[in-house]
Image (tube, helix red, strand yellow):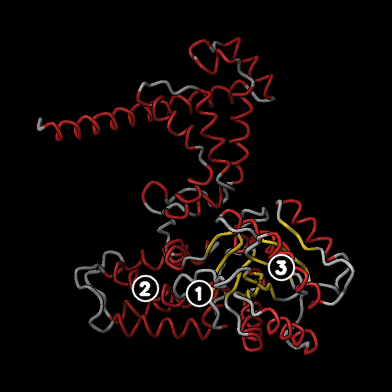
Amino acid sequence: MFENLTEKLQRTFKNLRGQGKLTEEHLDAALAEIREAMLEGDVALSVVDELLASIRSKALGSEVMLQLSPDQQVIKLVRDELTTLLGKHAKPLFASRPPSVWMMVGLQGSGKTTTTGKLAKWLAQHGHRPIVVSTDVYRPAAREQLAQVAKSIGANLWPGAGTDKPLEIVRGAIKEAKLSASDVVIVDTAGRLHIDDDLMNELGYLKKELQPSEILFIADAMIGQDAVRSAGEFHKRLGLTGVVLTKLDGDARGGAALSISKVSGAPVKFVGLGEKYDALEGFYPERIVSRILGMGDIMSLIERAEQAVDKKAAIELERKLRKSEFTLEDFRDQLRQIRKMGPLDQIVDMLPKIGPLQNIPKDASVDEGKLKQVEAIINSMTNQERLDHHVIDGKRRKRIAKGSGTSVQDVNQVLKQYMQMRTMMKQYGAMAARAKMKGLGKLAGLS
């Protein structure tokens, strides 16, 4: 996401480098480029104009630190204003007495049912006991679809059998939630247009009956400003508590994410970044802005790694590093841990686009295929070969290539990559040992 906007902004900042000071002429040129980049990125015109007016006012005032270079001054201002535009991180809301009710609302085809499943999984991962229910009595097989989603993620479902009245369905779900100690009821409502008074009134009745903690508008980021305008209309009718942006990973422009809070008046609370049910993240404005400016999102990367990495395996790997026992088996396990973190293009998107990382290709799908190939090659080795790479001679390499459906050159490349990583790990282990000894020395009064 945001690839196009990030690329154009970085080019703008690069043009400012080397200038002695930030003049009004330089600023006007930079703001013109930023304006073009944001409009091409499908950011709402009113949002762009307000943002740039604020940047210009502060740049020509006394609010920018004089010790910063022109490009650093503009980066700081853009970062601050974008963060203000996106608002503060909005935490999910829960009722003082469970169960809390979360209503999913939005247009047809925006991804409400899938998002209901994702939110149920997210809640379960954060210590809650959700139950899901569909009030979509209009679309054929809509309730059956949610039943399949609930089965896939292991979530509790209230089927609402025996009635086609939304109010009766949700009353039954709340009763079941109390009996089963479920603390959140996620209500997947039927898709509708804001101009459909009958269906919008139905949502009003549900809101009055349920007194929901959350009314979340599910917006497809791929339809851009149409989603933004729809969110605004729903907010006027219902008083949204938040927005969930789906398919944000498929929108290289990202304009909806930058516009929707300002235009609709409701904060973005979650973003969908893939089709899998765990591809949902909380929306953190500072992290998003950091990605837009090419600074990466290390906090999200760390959180994803903490979820994916086996802690016992990490401790064992640390022990092996200290003793220089990093084997091909360990190499394969590390690749598996990386793959657990999600699609490589999303991981790359979280890395800073500076220094040695600035030339990483945007399309990492080829590299993801390479990871599978590397694992296949290592799987074709015997236990002895994985534990001691020295025994892998020419004859063994041919057998490994044949067993993995690859070439001898591919096997050689994997062994070369393994040796490079082994050397790097050995250096890391030595540095860690020296640091530890230095710390012990200080404690003993030896340094």
Q: Residues within 10 Å of mark 1 (few under 14, many from 20)?
A: many
- Circle number at residue 256: none
Q: Which mark is residue 112?
A: 3
Residue 152: percent from the left, percent from the top? 74, 51
Give, as a three-letter code, the residue at label 1. Met
State the image coordinates of residue 181 (x, y, percent, origin top left). 66, 60
Q: Which residue is mark 1?
A: 38
Along the viewing direction, whichever of 351 and 17 lies nearer the viewer: 351
Q: Residue furthest front?
A: 179
**Image quarter for residue 274?**
bottom right
User: Where residue 68 sits: x, y (%)?
Assistant: 23, 68
Find the distance from the CA under tag 1 to the CA under tag 2.
16 Å
Nearest to N terminus: mark 1 or mark 3: 1
Residue lying at 72% horizontally and 57% vertically, measured from the top left: 156
Q: Is residue 184 left or right of residue 292?
A: right
**Nearer mark to the viewer, of 3 and 2:** 3
Q: Is residue 134 left or right of residue 27?
A: right
> What residue is at 53 percent from the left and 76 percent from the top?
267
Report the residue marked by disc 2.
Answer: 80
The part of the image, by quadrant, that contains residue 397 is top right
The quarter of the rendered structure image containing the N terminus is bottom right
Estimate how packed mark 2 is, as few (under 14), some (14 to 19) or many (20 or more) residues with alpha carbons within 10 Å.
some
The residue mark sitting in front, 1 or 2, is 2
Q: Nearer the viewer, mark 1 or mark 3?
A: 3
The residues bearing labels 3 and 2 have C-alpha atoms spaced at a distance of 32 Å
Residue 348 can be seen in this image = yes
User: Are the residues flagged by discs 1 and 2 in contact, CB closer than 8 Å?
Assistant: no
Note whether 88 is above or below 354 in the view shown. below
| Residue 160: quadrant of the picture | bottom right
